[in-house]
């Protein structure tokens, strides 16, 4: 919803067929964000290859315990230059690894170089409602962090940049 509000065309992947149908037919995500209209620029699919084809920026929003499996199932589908942005909170429970480390292990060093972490005091219901929200996009590559900032900033969603990926990931994991 944030990316669409920022003027981006969005393809959303979900393994849940009812979520895909809800978004495409009723323009709502009844399973997770009931009561909030999904913008017309969001199109959902349960085919990861279709969702990722041509994508310049990929927002990873699976729960931390599922991120590795999701990435493994999509290995080979990401565009070679796609920026990977983690909106996942927490660390991998089984290993204690941050999502940036999981991305590196599963997709390789080149993918890890195109990684950014998105974190902040944000709650999905409030963001979906358009309430003012500020987050940080952190990346070791300043130009990549600015790319994420420009891609996701909208009227009620402000993105700041920061080079401290580890601090951003751990800060997001430690919130209650």
Image (cartoon, helix red, strand yellow):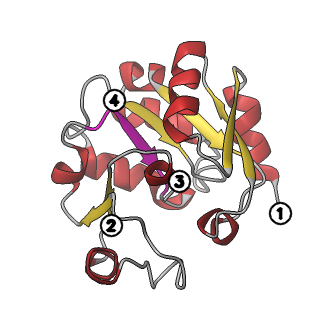
Single out the mark in the foreground, 4 or 3: 3
Residue 73 seen in the current view: yes
Mark 4 or mark 3: whose residue is earlier in sequence: 3
Q: Are marks 4 and 1 in contact (CB under 8 Å)?
A: no
User: Which residue is rendered at x = 31% and y = 22% of the image?
Assistant: 81
Give residue 49's position: percent from left, percent from top: 17, 50
SS type, badge 1: loop
Give residue 99's position: percent from left, percent from top: 55, 41
Magenta span of residues: 55-61
Mark 4 or mark 2: whose residue is earlier in sequence: 2
SS type, badge 4: loop
Q: What's the CA distance linking mark 4 and mark 3?
A: 18 Å
User: Which residue is rendered at x = 65% and y = 46% of the image?
Assistant: 96
Decide: few, some or many residues near mark 2? Use Cα within 10 Å; few <14, some 14-19, many ≥20.
Answer: some
Residue 57 inside the magenta-drawn segment: yes
Mark 4 or mark 1: whose residue is earlier in sequence: 4
Give residue 8's position: percent from left, percent from top: 39, 44
Q: Which mark is residue 100?
A: none
Q: Are marks 2 and 1 in contact (CB under 8 Å)?
A: no
Res 54 quadrant in image: top left
Which residue bears the numbered disc 4? 82
Residue 33 lies, with reference to residue 73, above or below; the image says below
Q: What's the CA distance linking mark 4 and mark 2?
A: 19 Å
Q: What's the CA distance linking mark 2 and mark 1?
A: 26 Å
Single out the mark in the foreground, 2 or 1: 2
Mark 3 or mark 2: whose residue is earlier in sequence: 3
Which residue bears the numbered disc 2? 14
Q: What's the CA distance linking mark 3 and mark 2?
A: 17 Å
Give residue 157's position: percent from left, percent from top: 66, 48
Which residue bears the numbered disc 3? 2
Which residue bears the numbered disc 1? 176
Residue 141 seen in the current view: no
């Amino acid at each position: 919803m944030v990316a669409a509000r920022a003027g981006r065309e969005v393809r959303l992947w979900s393994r849940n067929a009812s979520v895909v149908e809800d978004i495409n037919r009723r323009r709502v995500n009844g399973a997770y964000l009931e009561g909030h209209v999904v913008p017309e620029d969001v199109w959902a699919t349960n085919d990861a290859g279709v969702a990722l084809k041509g994508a310049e920026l990929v927002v990873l929003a699976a729960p931390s315990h599922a991120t590795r499996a999701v990435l493994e199932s999509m290995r080979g589908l990401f565009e070679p230059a796609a920026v990977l942005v983690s909106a996942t909170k927490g660390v991998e429970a089984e290993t204690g690894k941050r999502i940036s480390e999981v991305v590196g292990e599963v997709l390789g060093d080149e993918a890890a170089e195109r990684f950014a972490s998105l974190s902040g005091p944000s709650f999905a219901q409030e963001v979906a409602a358009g309430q003012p929200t500020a987050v940080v996009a952190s990346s070791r590559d300043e130009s990549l962090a600015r790319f994420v900032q420009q891609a996701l900033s909208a009227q009620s969603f402000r993105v700041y940049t920061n080079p401290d990926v580890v601090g951003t990931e751990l800060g997001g994991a430690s919130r209650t």
